[in-house]
Image: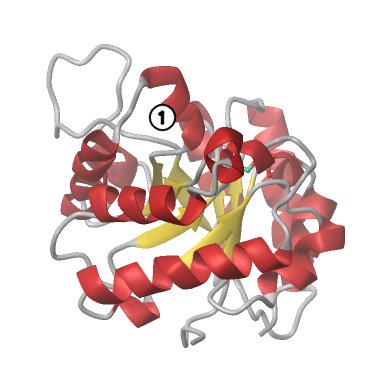
């Protein structure tokens, strides 16, 4: 079933960019948006934290929203180098990515940690994009559905609803490799995520489920029209305004 909301096209800049880059990117996207009479998608930019303010100034009232790439589960305190969700809210964010496979891989973030971070995001009044996805070994062992189901069950805070959580399916082997999952595999996993969401979230049939992993202008239309795909989380291609906007334009409205 398709959710009634517009597809969300999210750009995860990861650890890339400068203030000049951020300004140029945001302005280019705002210009492209202003050329359209109707916008059938919602656009989200997740820059590195030091660039949030320049992106916020550059997007102005265009409707482009901003997100953080991670946060700490605590509200404040002695956590050198970390950022609280409330700080991201204060900086003008509406969303925060949590549990990205690079966080899970680089920092050993397990589902319980991701769930606590997602809960902190919700407490701050923002929406977590909870990332899940299997490794290549898990897929080859035929465990993809089982692994992703467990990650969804373990990473989504109790009491979440379609207006307070988003799930992003990102197979680890598809991230940054140029090798996206097939439309068939995406359909299978998104369908199983929908099934588990329907059990654990009150209005699980309406939760947005994004796909991420080598989404590019040439595969975006096919991916975004798969059942239960409600948007995309884009890494590499979100660093190019033309490519990122082309992906957004491929979203069915
Ligand atoms: P990619 O990254 O589009 O470069 O594969 C996606 C992501 O990590 O969110």
What residue appears at the point 19 percent right and 44 percent down from the top-left corner?
A: 120
Q: Nearer the viewer, residue 229 or 65?
A: 229
Q: Is residue 62 visible?
A: no
Residue tagged 1: 104
* Residue 111 shows up from this direction: yes
- 104, 71: nearer the viewer: 104
Image point 56% across, 49% down: which residue? 45
- Quarter location, residue 204: bottom left
Judged from the image, the quadrant occupied by ligand 1 is: top right
Q: Where 175 sits versus 222, above or below?
A: above
Q: In this view, does 181 lie to the left or right of 90?
A: right
Q: Quadrant location of the C terminus? A: bottom right
- Estimate how packed mark 1 is, as few (under 14), some (14 to 19) or many (20 or more) residues with alpha carbons within 10 Å: some
Helix, strand or loop at label 1? It is: helix
Q: Is residue 77 shown above or below 207? A: above
Image-based side of 75 in relation to 29, left or right: left
Splitting the image into 4 quarters, where does residue 30 fall? bottom right
Q: Where does residue 69 sit, x and y in percent of width and height?
A: 45, 37
State whether label 1 is within 8 Å of ligand 1: no
Residue beneath the point at 15% across and 32% down = 74
Name the residue rendered at 58%, 32% in the picture.
Answer: 14
Q: Where is residue 193 in the image (x, y as percent from the top left)?
A: 42, 65
Q: Which of 120 and 171 lies nearest the eye of the viewer?
A: 171
């Amino acid at each position: 079933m398709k959710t009634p909301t517009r597809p969300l096209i999210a750009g995860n800049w990861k650890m890339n960019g400068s203030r000049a880059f951020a300004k140029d990117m945001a302005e280019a996207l705002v210009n492209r948006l202003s050329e359209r009479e109707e916008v059938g998608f919602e656009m989200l930019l997740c820059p590195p934290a030091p660039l949030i303010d320049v992106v916020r100034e550059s997007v102005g009232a265009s409707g482009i929203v901003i997100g953080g790439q991670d946060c700490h589960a605590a509200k404040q305190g002695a956590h050198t180098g970390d950022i609280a969700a409330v700080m991201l809210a204060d900086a003008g964010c509406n969303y925060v990515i949590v549990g990205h496979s690079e966080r899970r891989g680089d920092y050993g973030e397990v589902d319980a940690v991701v769930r606590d971070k997602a809960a902190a995001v919700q407490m701050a009044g923002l929406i977590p994009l909870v990332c899940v996805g299997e490794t290549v070994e898990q897929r080859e062992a035929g465990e993809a559905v089982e692994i992703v189901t467990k990650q969804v069950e373990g990473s989504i805070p109790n009491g979440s609803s379609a207006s307070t959580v988003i799930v992003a399916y990102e197979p680890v082997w598809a991230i940054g490799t140029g090798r996206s999952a097939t439309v068939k595999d995406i359909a299978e996993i998104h369908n199983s995520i929908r099934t588990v969401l329907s059990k654990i979230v009150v209005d699980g049939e309406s939760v947005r489920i994004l796909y991420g992993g080598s989404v590019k202008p040439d595969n975006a239309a096919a991916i975004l029209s798969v059942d239960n795909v409600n948007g995309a989380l884009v890494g590499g291609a979100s660093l190019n305004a033309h490519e990122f906007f082309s992906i957004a334009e491929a979203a069915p409205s």
